[in-house]
């Protein structure tokens, strides 16, 4: 049976025969019968069709544009003629609205139903529209906004009126936008009278308000405002990344990032916890600098949109547990020692000002944590990549200073964290550096000559190309970034320069100038000579082995807890994970052997999940529910972790089979080469991949 939707004669589902005209909305298929002369916008409100508006039907915003169709529609049993929506009204012919008026479109607030009609609501006119952003790796999603903008014209108060300004505003919003009577938040009351006065004209106070999901007016601006902003922030140990979005349309307007200034207190998380333990007031210092950095990031983002800070309505923040606690002003030291107890693992909402952000109309939503070392950034990555929605077993690895690992499918999920340290980001490497112009990012080594060719960030040409010298002259070759160090170590192994124990084969120094004596060990010269030389030392190899062994041991531990399932999908997340070569990651044993097409980089999954949580209440709730089902595995207290760590020190691994990798390259075989200066045996690989 059809369900009554609102005013007389309007029905949700199939129409009920009444004296009026039938209207069908596509693509939803909602249909009903309305009186002659009803506007399309009013019909959409009554029937429940998803048609946007900010101005409340005044022809100002242009968000309610629809596309009328004509002809016979057997599906609905109606025929539509050209006059079904009447002649264009003056606000259409003289349109001066904010959005371009597309050819063939009509304004839903002006077009009157004068006959049976089929009306298409294009994506740009839908409230719950789909958003696709490839550059952010944002999957197609439906916007489910927390805020609605309403333009209203409030009658100016006169002597003898009994209604307060807030009551008049609430009543006007309900009347002009056909919605429940809202309440007004305490925070916006001081802005109410000035906004009404500034918007005064023709006996009315013209203002735009933002109404949240709890039907509260949380912001007010004089005149017509079309756009309100939301910001999603991923607080990493090394970098802080942010994205600013239109919270009503879902459009991602700008992205930026900056270094986390906490680095000066320690490159890794435990160093920062130690700083707090050893320095009274250290926790306050860490809190102040990260809040200041985020506030600066907010300023950078809104400046890129050309908007003032008061347009920001919400800031979604995710980060690892220590960043989470420090941001909130909570002592992080309990997370630095067993049992690693979180003060809270729940999602929190508070005023932006309480976290030191200059965004007077904004609230902050801080995502939920999972365990003492698995934070809200992992919760956001789970939302973005969806292991809990996967039919097969997915391995999600967010590689950074602290690696977060999730293994699961729609039936069960496991999560852990491994302390990889900053080596993967270029730190603790003799020629290591951040991923900036001039850094070596890709390496290939000829197994016959041991000569390397490489590419640097900011230059397209390879180093063996004739134009390379000129192309790189502006920056020079300055060092090796994280993806470059993975490449070069994997290539050194494949070329036989290092053995399965990670030892540089000193005996090669007698046959090639690329391997040189370096104190009691040896180094491999990647580029140049003298002071300009970029080389990989034995200590560099060890640093990468230790980092990759910590990561791989964490993965193997989760695999054991899951009962050794077949992994069919490996996703490498994070700024570092987005740029490493999947094959060379497997050659090092960084991740388990898997068919190469099933290993892929997914970029900043935590940032993507934060954007999704910002733009959709449905997805935010999904994230909060998903993390409650995750089984937490604490690597620091697992007796098997050390044994797995030792096995993972070998290249690629002491015992794990590598059939898929072996199909693509020729892996060096045991026995391990001698570690002296004499001649040794070298295996050659197949064609480069």
Image (spheres, rainbow, N blue to C red):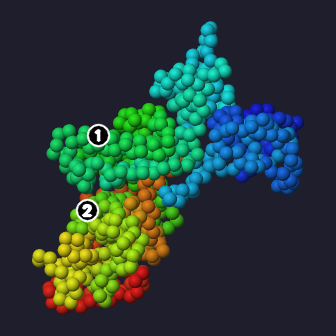
Q: Position of residue 413 (x, y in %)?
A: 43, 60
Q: Position of residue 99 (x, y in %)?
A: 65, 43
Q: CA distance from mark 1 to mark 2?
A: 25 Å
Vertical comparison of 83 with 221: above or below: below
Q: Is 518 situated left or right of 596 in this image?
A: left
Quadrant in which residue 464 is drawn:
bottom left
Quadrant of image for the N terminus: top right
Q: Position of residue 606 (x, y in %)?
A: 42, 54
* Label whose residue precedes the other's in the sequence (1 or 2): 1
- In the foreground, 570 or 341: 570
**Residue assigned mark 1:** 288
Characterize the local packing of mark 2: few (<14), some (14-19) or many (20 or more) Cα atoms within 10 angstroms: many
Quadrant in which residue 513 is drawn:
bottom left
**Residue assigned mark 2:** 427
Q: Is 148 situated left or right of 331 in this image?
A: right
Most extreme residue toward the left is: 520
- In the foreground, 41 or 623: 41
Vertical comparison of 592 with 336: above or below: below
Quadrant in which residue 400 is drawn:
bottom left
Confirm whether residue 561 shows in the render.
Answer: no
Quadrant of image for the C terminus: bottom left
Confirm whether residue 569 shows in the render.
Answer: yes
Circle 2: element type: loop
């Amino acid at each position: 049976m059809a369900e009554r939707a609102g005013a007389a004669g309007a029905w949700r589902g199939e129409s009920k025969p009444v004296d009026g005209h039938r209207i069908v909305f596509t693509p939803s298929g909602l249909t009903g019968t309305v009186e002659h002369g009803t506007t399309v916008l009013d019909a959409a409100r009554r029937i429940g069709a998803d048609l946007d508006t900010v101005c409340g039907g005044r022809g100002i915003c242009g968000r309610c544009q629809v596309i009328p169709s004509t002809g016979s529609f057997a599906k609905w049993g109606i025929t539509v003629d050209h006059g079904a929506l009447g002649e264009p009204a003056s606000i259409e012919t003289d349109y001066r609205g904010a959005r371009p008026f597309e050819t063939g479109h009509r304004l839903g607030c002006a077009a009157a139903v004068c006959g049976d009609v089929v009306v298409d609501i294009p994506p740009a006119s839908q409230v719950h529209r789909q958003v696709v952003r490839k550059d952010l790796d944002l999957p197609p999603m439906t916007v489910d906004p927390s805020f609605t903008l309403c333009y209203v014209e409030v009658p100016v108060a006169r002597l003898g009126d009994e209604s307060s300004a807030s009551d008049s505003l609430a009543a006007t919003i309900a009347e002009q936008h056909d919605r429940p009577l809202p309440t007004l938040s305490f925070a916006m009351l001081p802005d109410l009278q000035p906004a009404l006065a500034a918007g005064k004209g023709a006996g009315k106070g013209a203002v735009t308000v933002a109404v949240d999901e709890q039907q509260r007016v949380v912001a007010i601006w004089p005149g017509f405002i079309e756009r309100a902003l939301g910001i999603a922030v991923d607080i990493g140990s090394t970098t802080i990344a942010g994205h600013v979005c239109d919270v009503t349309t879902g459009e991602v307007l700008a992205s930026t990032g900056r270094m986390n200034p906490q680095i000066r207190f320690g490159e890794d998380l435990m160093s920062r916890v130690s700083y707090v333990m050893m320095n009274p007031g250290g926790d306050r210092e860490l809190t102040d600098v990260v809040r200041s950095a985020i506030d600066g990031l907010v300023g950078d983002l809104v400046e890129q949109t050309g908007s003032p800070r008061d347009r920001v309505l919400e800031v979604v923040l995710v980060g690892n547990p220590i960043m989470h606690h420090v941001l909130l002003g909570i002592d992080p030291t309990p997370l630095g020692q067993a049992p690693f107890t979180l003060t809270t693992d729940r999602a929190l909402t508070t005023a932006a000002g309480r976290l030191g952000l200059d965004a007077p109309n904004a609230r902050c939503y801080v995502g939920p944590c999972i365990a003492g070392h698995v934070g809200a950034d992992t919760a956001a990555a789970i939302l973005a990549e969806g292991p809990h929605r996967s039919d097969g077993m997915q391995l999600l690895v967010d590689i950074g200073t602290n690696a977060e690992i999730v293994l699961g499918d729609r039936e069960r999920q496991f999560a852990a964290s491994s302390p990889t340290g900053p080596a993967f980001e270029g730190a603790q490497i003799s020629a290591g550096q951040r991923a900036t112009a001039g850094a070596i990012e890709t390496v290939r080594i000829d197994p016959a000559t041991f000569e390397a060719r490489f590419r640097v960030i900011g230059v397209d040409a390879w180093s063996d190309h004739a134009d390379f010298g000129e192309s790189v002259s502006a920056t020079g070759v300055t060092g090796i970034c994280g993806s470059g160090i993975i490449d070069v170590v994997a290539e050194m192994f494949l070329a036989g320069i290092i053995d399965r124990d990670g030892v540089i084969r000193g005996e090669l120094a007698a046959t090639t100038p690329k391997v040189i004596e370096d104190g009691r060990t040896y180094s491999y010269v990647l580029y140049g000579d003298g002071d300009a030389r970029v080389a990989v030392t034995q200590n560099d190899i060890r640093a990468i082995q230790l980092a990759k062994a910590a990561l791989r041991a964490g993965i193997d531990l989760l695999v054991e807890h899951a009962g050794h399932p077949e992994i069919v999908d490996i996703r490498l997340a994070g700024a570092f994970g987005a740029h490493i070569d999947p094959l060379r990651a497997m050659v090092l044993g960084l991740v388990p052997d898997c068919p190469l097409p099933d290993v892929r980089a997914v970029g900043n999954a935590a940032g993507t999940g934060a954007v999704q949580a910002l733009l959709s209440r449905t997805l935010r709730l999904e994230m909060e529910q998903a993390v409650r089902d995750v089984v937490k595995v604490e690597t620091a207290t697992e007796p098997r972790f050390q044994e797995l760590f030792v096995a993972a020190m070998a290249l690629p691994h002491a015992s794990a089979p590598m059939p898929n990798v072996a199909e693509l390259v020729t892996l060096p075989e045991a026995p391990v080469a001698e570690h002296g200066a004499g001649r040794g045996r070298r295996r050659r690989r197949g064609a480069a991949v």
